Image: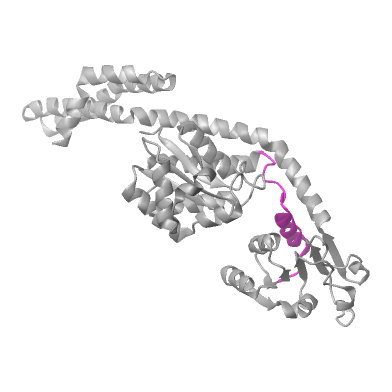
């Protein structure tokens, strides 16, 4: 019952962006898909994690639901012939593999940027949406809380989350450091290719700021601005926007620089301006720092900062895996105990029925005060009697020998018949 966890999905590792986009799901789509799983599959619990890098479904079922899940994703996303995309999907049909994979994904070991800071929050959202649709049962509840506690240990005990390990993260990290003395910095993001968009999204981590986005395709700029609450600058007006901004992040695709020293000849720099050139070839004139007040950081500066953080994170991986293994071992013990908990409950119910029936036979012969004392004493006796079998059953479970003991207890106390009587 509790060792039926499986996983199906696709990720950046072997799936092109166009296909990942096709199967990507937002909150609304995920909730609709969870309801399809509930109605049309043999799945009792499920959680769906969908980001720009992956769409993965973790579920509990006695049988492999790969084909069913693929068909239902097609229905949810309006994709015909989903089998044509089956080559991009992985499947973990073994319980232990699926559990380990969810740990690795959640902690950031499977991230495109090792130790990705965003992934754990994305997992928390996925868990909440699963709970909202009543698709998170006892197993997923316990598993996810174990993962969250493990993540906390990783943060506190290792260097795995230290520093910014991608260019976009490192850029925003540096901006955050440089603007501590500016109450509400004006930040211009010029160019919204992959890296420009990543930087724009990561700017959400800076609490107080005013962000302007500028792109040759104003439709893309407007869509991103609407999503993130930013302001749009027409690309034709980028020069005036550069002159007014405190921070300029340029990732424009261009053969020649488009931001020159001459731009500031008629716009005196009253305080420091920080320019980040993330373009290759460069989009900001390389000697622009000859203008007083201008400070330039190029892609090499940022990558060096990111590389140092990445080295620290990679060095911390063995410690992270050790913490994950400890958590999985502890979680595995809980999972095994859950296998025998129905038997324990049946045994408790059987003994409680015996106790109540025996007391009922003698109630007319004793006073209310005596009845209360008898009830208290017999309850204490039952707790002591059942303690040893429960401990033995849990110990046998850890040894993988629970089945034989369960059979003995069923025979001794006729537990199956007891359960049938309770149902009547």
Residue 19 at x, y = what percent? 55, 53
Residue 160: in magenta span: yes
Based on the displayed image, in which of its 4 quarters is residue 396 positioned? top left
Which region shows up in magenta? Answer: 158-185
**Residue 188 vertical position relative to residue 152 in the rendered view, above or below:** below
Left or right placement of residue 385 versus residue 201 in this view: left
**Residue 349 vertical position relative to residue 86 in the rendered view, above or below:** above
Based on the displayed image, in which of its 4 quarters is residue 209 positioned? bottom right
* Figure disc tally: 0
Viewer-proximal residue among 401 and 196? 196
Looking at the image, can residue 134 be seen? no
Viewer-proximal residue among 405 and 1? 1
Left or right placement of residue 150 versus residue 30 in this view: right
Residue 89 at x, y = what percent? 51, 44
Looking at the image, can residue 225 be seen? yes
Viewer-proximal residue among 394 and 124? 124
Left or right placement of residue 124 versus residue 265 in this view: left
Residue 286: in magenta span: no
Name the residue rendered at 88%, 71% in the picture: 293
Residue 174 at x, y = what percent? 76, 58
């Amino acid at each position: 019952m509790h060792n039926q966890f499986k996983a199906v999905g696709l990720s950046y590792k072997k799936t092109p962006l166009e296909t990942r986009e096709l199967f990507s799901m937002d909150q609304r789509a995920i909730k609709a898909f969870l309801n399809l799983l509930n109605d049309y599959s043999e799945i009792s619990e499920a959680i769906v994690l969908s980001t720009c890098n992956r769409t993965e479904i973790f579920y509990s079922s006695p049988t492999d639901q790969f084909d069913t899940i693929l068909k239902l994703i097609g229905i949810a996303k309006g994709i015909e012939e989903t089998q044509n995309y089956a080559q991009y999907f992985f499947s973990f049909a073994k319980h232990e593999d699926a559990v380990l994979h969810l740990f690795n994904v959640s902690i950031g070991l499977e991230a495109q940027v090792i130790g990705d800071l965003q992934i754990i929050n994305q997992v928390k959202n996925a868990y909440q949406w699963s709970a909202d649709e009543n698709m998170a049962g006892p197993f997923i509840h316990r598993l996810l809380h174990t993962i969250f506690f493990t993540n906390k240990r990783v943060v506190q005990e290792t260097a795995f989350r230290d520093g910014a390990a991608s260019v976009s993260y490192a850029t925003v990290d540096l901006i955050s450091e440089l603007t501590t003395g500016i109450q509400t910095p004006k930040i211009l993001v010029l160019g919204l290719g992959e890296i420009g968009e990543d930087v724009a999204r990561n700017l959400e981590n800076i609490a107080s700021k005013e962000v302007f986005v500028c792109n040759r395709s104003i439709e893309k700029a407007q869509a991103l601005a609407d999503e993130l609450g930013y302001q749009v600058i027409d690309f034709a007006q980028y020069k005036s926007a550069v002159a007014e901004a405190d921070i300029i992040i340029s990732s424009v695709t261009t053969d020649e620089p488009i931001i020159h020293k001459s731009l500031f000849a008629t716009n005196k720099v009253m305080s420091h301006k920080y320019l980040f050139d993330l373009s290759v070839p460069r989009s900001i004139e390389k000697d622009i720092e000859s203008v007083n007040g201008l400070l330039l950081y190029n892609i090499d500066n940022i990558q060096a900062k990111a590389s140092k953080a990445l080295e620290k994170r990679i060095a911390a991986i063995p410690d992270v895996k050790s913490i994950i293994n400890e958590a999985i071992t502890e979680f595995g013990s809980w999972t095994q105990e859950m296998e025998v908990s129905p038997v324990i409950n049946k045994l408790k119910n059987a003994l409680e029925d015996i106790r109540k029936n025996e007391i009922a036979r003698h109630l007319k012969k004793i006073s209310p005060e005596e009845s209360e004392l008898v009830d208290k004493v017999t309850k204490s006796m039952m707790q002591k009697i059942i303690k040893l079998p429960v401990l033995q059953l849990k110990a046998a479970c850890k040894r993988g020998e629970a089945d034989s003991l369960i059979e003995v207890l069923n025979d001794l106390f006729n537990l199956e018949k007891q359960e049938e009587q309770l149902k009547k």
